[in-house]
Image (tube, grey):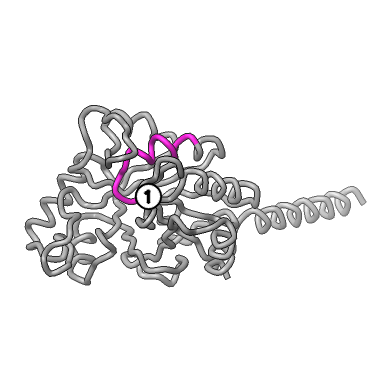
């Protein structure tokens, strides 16, 4: 009789554990929304609202609060890589927050908001822009996160690659990354990795081709992100990953719609 009771107890505990696991972790077909931001300014500071890439601090706060209030979990690049490469489970309602370029506004405004909600994010840095000393933040001009600020903010941000000095459009409207010879690209990537060791990359201006993908693989990169709209799942090419850009005009209602649309 005691043995029977013990067996039933073990079965109940096992069922509870499996149920808890299913409640906490996503299934193998889970889609991950990768959000893309650039620059942040307060509404009172923004004199260039025609630039849709400048998201208001006020809206960013509302968006992060929405994620927090609705049970979303922010993940790291490595967590996403483990999921795509090995099938390692992710929390349900996983979101990856990314910023491109490395503007100081990410440190001044995004960092404390993310910290408030215990969120993580990744910044794809143009490493040639990293100043040795902190720059004075001025909303009327662009400044970049310094070496010391990178170190100070690593509890929230991970720093990843957006090239060293190939983030520019050339006369044919192609990025310097696409126009350059292989040896130039390899040198650029290696310099960038010396400054911020990483295996994760975002294509400048979202431009890429199979040649660039091949070079990234040869240089040890494991994930690369485009600006194509859509969610990420295990069927995706890990060097052509989608993101969802967030703009100045993205209201909280549109933000909610984006999350629901791309998760379905």
Mark 1 sits on what residue? 99
Residue ID at (66%, 58%) = 22
Q: Which quadrant holds the C terminus?
A: bottom right
* Residue displayed at 30% across by 40% down: 140
Q: Nearer the viewer, residue 248 or 94?
A: 248
Which segment did they paint magenta?
99-112
Task: Between residue 120 and residue 42, name the one nearer to us.
Answer: 42
**Is label 1 in a helix, a strand or a loop?**
strand
**Residue at the limit of the structure toward the right, as seen here:** 1
Name which quarter of the figure residue 191 lies in.
top left
Q: Position of residue 202 (x, y in %)?
A: 30, 57
Q: Position of residue 79 (x, y in %)?
A: 45, 51
Task: Report the residue at 57% width, 53% height from top.
Answer: 91
- The quarter of the displayed image where residue 142 is located: top left
Relative to residue 158, is residue 190 drawn left or right? left
| Quadrant in which residue 137 is drawn | top left
Give the class, few, some or many, for how many residues have Cα within 10 Å of label 1's Cα (few <14, many ≥20).
Answer: many
Q: Name the side, left or right, on which 88 lies relative to 200.
A: right
Q: Is residue 28 visible?
A: no
What type of secondary structure mainly makes up the magenta span? helix
Nearest the viewer among 90 and 63 is 63
Say above or below: 236 vs 249: below
Residue 10 colored in magenta in the image: no
Horizontally, residue 102 falls left or right of residue 12, namely left
Rendered location of residue 86, percent (x, y)? 44, 60
What residue appears at the point 56 percent right and 39 percent down from the top-left corner?
117
Residue 185 lies left or right of residue 157; in this view the side is: left
Residue 225 visible? The answer is yes
Residue 244 at x, y percent in the picture? 44, 62
């Amino acid at each position: 009789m005691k043995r029977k009771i013990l067996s039933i107890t073990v079965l109940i505990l096992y069922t509870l554990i499996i149920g808890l696991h299913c409640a906490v972790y996503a299934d193998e077909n889970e889609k991950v929304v990768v959000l893309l931001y650039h620059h942040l300014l307060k509404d009172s500071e923004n004199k260039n609202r025609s630039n849709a890439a400048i998201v208001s601090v006020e809206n960013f706060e509302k968006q992060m609060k929405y994620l927090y209030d609705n049970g979303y979990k922010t993940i790291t690049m490595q967590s996403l890589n483990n999921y795509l490469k090995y099938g390692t489970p992710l929390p349900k309602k996983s979101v990856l927050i990314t910023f491109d370029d490395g503007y100081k506004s990410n440190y001044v405004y995004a960092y404390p908001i993310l910290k408030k909600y215990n969120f993580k994010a990744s910044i794809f840095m143009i490493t040639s822009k990293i100043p040795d000393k902190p720059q004075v933040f001025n909303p009327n001009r662009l400044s970049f996160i310094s070496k010391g600020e990178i170190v100070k903010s690593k509890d929230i941000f991970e720093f990843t690659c957006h090239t060293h000095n190939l983030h520019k459009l050339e006369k044919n409207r192609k990025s310097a990354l696409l126009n350059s010879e292989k040896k130039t690209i390899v040198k650029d990537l290696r310099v960038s990795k010396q400054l911020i060791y990483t295996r994760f990359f975002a294509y400048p201006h979202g431009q890429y081709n199979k040649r660039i993908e091949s070079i990234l693989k040869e240089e040890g990169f494991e994930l690369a992100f485009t600006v194509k709209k859509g969610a990420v799942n295990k069927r995706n090419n890990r060097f052509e990953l989608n993101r969802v850009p967030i703009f100045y005009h993205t209201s909280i209602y549109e933000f909610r719609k984006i999350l629901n649309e791309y998760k379905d």
